[in-house]
Amino acid sequence: MRLLASRRRLVAAALALALPLVLAPSAAAEPSTSTAYRAGAASTRMTGRAFDACTAPSLAAMRAWTASPYRAVAVYLSGASRTCAQPELTASWVTEVSRLKWRLIPIHKGLQPPCGARATDPKISLTPATATTQGTAAANEAIAAAKALGMLPGSVFYNDIEFYDPANTACRTAVLTYLSAWTKRLHATGYVSGVYMNLAKGAENLADTYTSASYARPDALWIARYDGVASLTGWAGVPDSRWAVHQRGKQYLGDHDETYGGVTINIDSDQWDGPVATVAYTHRATSTTPLAARSGPSTSYGTVKTYAPGAALRVVCQTPGPTVGTSPVWDKLSDGTYVTDYYVDTASQTTYTSPLPRCAYPWQVNSATGLTMRTGPGTSYATAGSIADGGLAWVVCQRTGTKVGTSPIWNKLDNNRWVSDYYVKNPSGTTYSTPAPRC
């Protein structure tokens, strides 16, 4: 991705932790593995233009660039192959940049293919068992770095795999084995798995194993192809039906200078429609009496704790629920509890507030023929499109409906459509899956 500038221009021309383990049920076979989101988790996605720079820009530069067409910035989170130092990338920087309504795209640039990238980069092992251990360790490293920066469970991390020879069988197997372990570890610990690859020098291999029983499939694919075309479809070797539901990013223009607000930054340009990091935003309780924090987004849920008037609240996302005062919005906090937005100092007491995302929990669809979306929670409701195998079901809540297979549960999606939970790869195939609330 971000090589030394002169090196990368040549390449572009040539190419024209140990965190506590939250176990998910073992998959009978790949590629779909369930994501065990923690109580305070939520996933965030972004659609629009993004950029990445070798070194995270200063807060002043990010403030100046709010005048730009970009709305997300990729940052090098961790990894032994990072080219540039990251003096700006701190927890306070993440907090302040997020307040400026920037979304963050975390990158792990660690071990590289044994038959590609820079000769000086540490390499993935050609021994499958070792490559598996390395992929797990890479996920642990990214999680630890993200935690230190204030990025929450439900965040995505993109493993930066630079160009390699896709015809080299041993090398290809090493890369795919490493990425499979990366994905499984992220899913088991409550995070979303992303991969960055050159379109012609790696991404096709990943696409070829999309339905393979040998490898866990990442949730999102970010490709590099410096053709100046900001399109998220029509990728040679990667069918449009794969990573099709808010699961794609494209780096379409290599390093160049752009200037906004009087500040010039050397960047790569990206088009984005996919998951990004999840962070918490600090707000205050405005109630005059203790504010109840409940186990779900409704007054029918039990009170877990209370917050004193004026107390700081770490809000992760917002979701609909019963109206309190003038607001039908509920705020999910980083501890997994919910408070009515009516008594929180967000910008609106009647609707959602930017940049707070909507609460959603993406799980992969696990159906070779795709999954039908419906207008309600049952097979008697009208059909309303479908999600291809491996697409993400962005679940906002669950309720019972027509039993399908072993499950009576139906998932409401963030587009207001419904799908049977039986074909969604989450921790349970028979009942509700936390932390998705009841509808």
Image: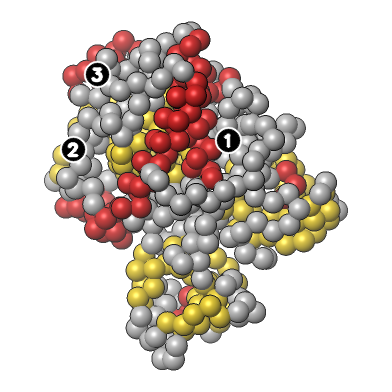
The residue that mark 2 highlights is 85
Q: Is residue 258 left or right of residue 21?
A: left
The residue that mark 1 highlights is 244
The residue that mark 3 highlights is 120
Q: Is residue 7 left or right of residue 435?
A: left
Coloring basis for residues: secondary structure
Count the marks: how many? 3
Res. 163 image quadrant: top left
Res. 347 image quadrant: bottom left
Mark closer to the chain start, 2 or 3:
2
Between 66 and 140, the residue placed more toward the observer is 140
| Residue 136 shows in the view | yes
Q: Is residue 102 left or right of residue 136?
A: left
Quadrant of the rendering where the N terminus is positioned: top left
SS label for mark 2 = loop
User: Disc 2 vs disc 3: which is toward the camera?
Assistant: 3
**Rendering coords of residue 327 (x, y %):** 53, 77
| Residue at 83% across, 53% down | 403
**Rendering coords of residue 337 (x, y %):** 51, 71
| Residue at 35% across, 47% down | 144
SS label for mark 1 = loop
